Image (cartoon, grey):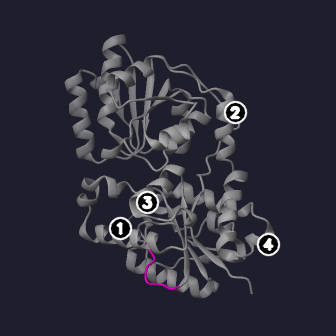
């Protein structure tokens, strides 16, 4: 019998599920549906009940792990659950997709998806975690080093794997995220210039830099609005609120937390521009989503931004005045360049890249 590969799609729901990792994993599942039958029949999935798992039909293994806070299994229960799934599927290859559920100590072949190595660059982030979470991340790095193949979500992540962990280029495949483009673009001119910062208010995303840039913009033009959309803890929000007060822009800044996909679409449709100030990213989903919706993007220069946004965004130094200047002159992304990005993140392109990677390990 042909070797069977088991992909972990549990991150498609729970704490990961709304954005980021969850969206990437749902894209992998959708891409597998587009595989030729001879390959798709060899791919099984383990996950929580729901549409993503249902798409695998008889090739689905329902997760039985205890789902803790946010419906994410603990590491120990998740490992036991994976043992059972591997036995039930008779899989010979595991595709691990969850950094919080590293698979170590097994002699079977594995593929590991790597989104970024930010905790290795931002030591303050790693040290702020609980000790058990730090240990799990070390196991995750060990899993990366021992994997038969590694799927990186961008070329910049692939290069980071080579430079930071010494991974041989021949073991790495780049499989970009599936990013859905809207069927039609609906843009409405806002009553005043409106700028979006989409994503968690993590330290490496430098939300205070966006605030200072908007402060320069507001001083120059006397109007404008800055909307932070994404999760944040009270301490992060309070620090940013204090900064807004010092800059005299409190009434022009809002912290909106997580929003539905529908509300995010509305926000994109009424935005003057999206501002991305991250100093490091594995990929950067919101800027690409914005570009595909015809929204101007202002991004700080990083390897990921240069790779994913070159030719469609204003890429500037991490300087408040430079960012403010770009915010004052937003440029609609040119359709030719947008078309190339749309193709790169289409289901056909992602399915082709993923299938090529799977065939290399299933031969």
On residue 137, which mark appears? 1
Q: Earlier in the sequence, mark 1 or mark 3?
A: 3
Q: Dividing the picture into quarters, in which one does residue 309 lie?
A: top right
Q: Residues within 10 Å of mark 1 (few under 14, many from 20)?
A: many
Residue hosting label 4? 38
How far apart are labels 4 and 2 at the CA level? 35 Å
How far apart are labels 4 and 1 at the CA level? 36 Å
Q: Earlier in the sequence, mark 4 or mark 1?
A: 4
Residue hosting label 2? 184
Q: Dividing the picture into quarters, in which one does residue 187 lie?
A: top right
- Magenta-drawn segment: 102-107
Against 128, residue 63 (above or below) is below
Q: Earlier in the sequence, mark 2 or mark 3?
A: 3
- Secondary structure, mark 1, is helix
- Secondary structure, mark 2, is loop
How far apart are labels 2 and 3 at the CA level? 30 Å
Residue hosting label 3? 15
**Nearer the observer, disc 4 or disc 2?**
4
Left or right of 80 in this view: 320: left
Report if the CB atoms under discs 1 and 3 are less than 8 Å apart: no
Q: Quadrant of the C terminus?
A: bottom right
Q: Earlier in the sequence, mark 4 or mark 2?
A: 4
């Amino acid at each position: 019998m042909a070797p069977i590969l088991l992909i972990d799609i549990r991150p498609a729901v729970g704490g990961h599920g709304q954005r980021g990792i969850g969206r990437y994993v749902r894209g992998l599942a959708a891409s597998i549906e587009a595989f030729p039958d001879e390959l798709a029949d060899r791919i099984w999935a383990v996950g929580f009940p729901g549409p993503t798992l249902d798409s695998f039909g008889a090739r689905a293994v329902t997760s039985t792990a205890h789902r803790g806070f946010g419906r994410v299994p603990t590491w120990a229960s998740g490992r036991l659950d994976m043992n059972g799934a591997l036995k039930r599927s008779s899989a010979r290859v595991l595709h691990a997709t969850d950094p919080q559920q590293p698979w170590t100590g097994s002699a079977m072949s594995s593929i590991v998806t790597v989104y970024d190595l930010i905790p290795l660059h931002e030591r303050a982030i790693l040290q702020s975690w609980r000790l058990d979470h730090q240990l799990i991340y070390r196991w995750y790095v060990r899993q990366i080093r021992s994997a038969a193949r590694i799927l990186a979500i961008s070329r910049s992540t692939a290069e980071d794997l080579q430079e930071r962990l010494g991974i041989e280029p021949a073991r790495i495949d780049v499989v970009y995220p599936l990013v859905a483009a809207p069927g039609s673009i609906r843009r409405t001119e806002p009553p005043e210039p409106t700028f979006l910062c989409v994503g968690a208010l993590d330290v490496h995303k430098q939300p205070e830099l966006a605030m200072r840039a908007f402060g320069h913009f507001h001083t120059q033009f006397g109007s404008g609005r800055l909307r932070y959309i994404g999760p944040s803890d009270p301490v992060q929000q309070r620090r940013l609120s204090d900064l807004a007060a010092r800059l005299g822009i409190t009434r022009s800044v809002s912290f909106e937390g997580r929003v539905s996909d529908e509300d995010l679409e509305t926000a994109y449709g009424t935005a003057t521009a999206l501002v991305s100030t991250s100093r490091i990213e594995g990929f950067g989903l919101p800027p690409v989503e914005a570009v595909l919706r015809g929204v101007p993007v202002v991004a700080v220069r990083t390897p990921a931004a240069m790779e994913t946004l070159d030719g469609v965004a204003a890429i500037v130094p991490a300087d408040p005045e430079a960012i403010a200047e770009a915010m004052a002159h937003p440029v609609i992304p040119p359709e030719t360049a947008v078309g190339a990005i749309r193709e790169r993140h289409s289901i056909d392109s992602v399915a082709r890249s993923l299938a090529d990677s799977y065939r290399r390990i299933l031969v």
